[in-house]
Image: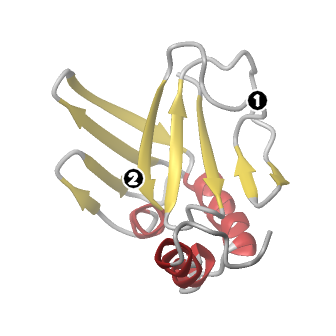
């Protein structure tokens, strides 16, 4: 099943995984306005499914079991380039095999946009709070 990893610096803690055929055999990754896309065609309009994962969960899953409940991630044994992703929903569950090298490369590219440990600064929480307290006006004047 085709899948794409998508990262947006405006939501720095999250990575979206889109499942479904976006009409492309290979995924072109590129930087665009602070976003890193596995697909260039935007939101999944073909009835595919999108899951929101923690960037830290993906990072942790590269080296050992990570996650609990509906989302679990773990590397294959024996040094294989396989990362297992298990997703559970009320309608069922699925087990996916991902390339650990591709996920690792993707995470390194996200870190070029927002460094590990700098996610809170990228959110601009203080600016958003100030805007709310000032009645919704943009504190930057834009």
Q: Residue at left 50%, top 20%?
A: 48
Q: Position of residue 90 (x, y in %)?
A: 16, 27
Label 2 crowd bin: few (<14), some (14–19), many (20+), radius 10 Å:
some
Name which quarter of the figure residue 94 lies in. top left
Residue at 73% across, 53% down: 36
Mark 2 → mark 1, Cα distance in angstroms: 23 Å
Q: Report the label total.
A: 2
Quadrant in the rendering for residue 46: top right
Relative to 73, does residue 28 appear above or below in the rendering? Answer: above
Note whether 46 is above or below 29 in the view shown. above
Residue assigned mark 2: 76
The location of residue 49, given as percent across then percent down, is: 45, 26
Q: Earlier in the sequence, mark 2 or mark 1?
A: 1
Q: Please name the residue shown 62% across and 64% down the image.
A: 107
Front residue of 22/12: it is 12
Q: Residue at x 74, y 22 (%)?
A: 25
* 53 lies above or below 141: above
Q: Viewer-proximal residue, 60 or 129?
A: 129
Nearer to us: label 2 or label 1? 1
Q: Which of the labelled discs sits on residue 26, or is there none?
A: 1
Q: Please name whichever residue, 38 or 138, is drawn nearer the observer in this view of the structure.
A: 138
Residue 41, how many percent across, how many down? 75, 28
Applied colour scheme: secondary structure
SS state under label 1 = loop
Relative to 83, is 44 on the left or the right? right
Q: Secondary structure at mark 2?
A: loop
> Which quadrant of the structure image shows residue 103?
bottom right
Residue 65: x, y in percent? 29, 63
Name the disc covering residue 18, or none: none
For the residue carrying disc 1, how many other residues have a C-alpha within 10 Å: few (<14), some (14-19), or many (20+)? Answer: few
């Amino acid at each position: 099943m085709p899948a794409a990893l998508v990262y947006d610096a405006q939501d720095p803690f999250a990575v979206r995984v889109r499942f479904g055929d976006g009409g492309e055999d290979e995924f072109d990754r590129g930087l665009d306005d602070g976003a890193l896309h596995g697909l260039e065609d935007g939101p999944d309009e073909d009835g595919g499914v999108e899951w929101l994962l923690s960037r830290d969960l993906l990072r942790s899953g590269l080296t050992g079991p990570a996650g609990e409940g509906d989302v679990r991630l773990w590397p294959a044994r024996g040094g294989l380039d396989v990362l297992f992703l298990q997703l559970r929903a009320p309608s069922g569950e699925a087990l996916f095999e991902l390339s650990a090298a591709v996920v690792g490369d993707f995470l390194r590219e996200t870190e070029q946009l927002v460094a590990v440990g700098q996610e809170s600064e990228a959110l601009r929480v203080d600016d958003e709070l100030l805007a709310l307290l000032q009645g919704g006006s943009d504190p930057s004047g834009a």
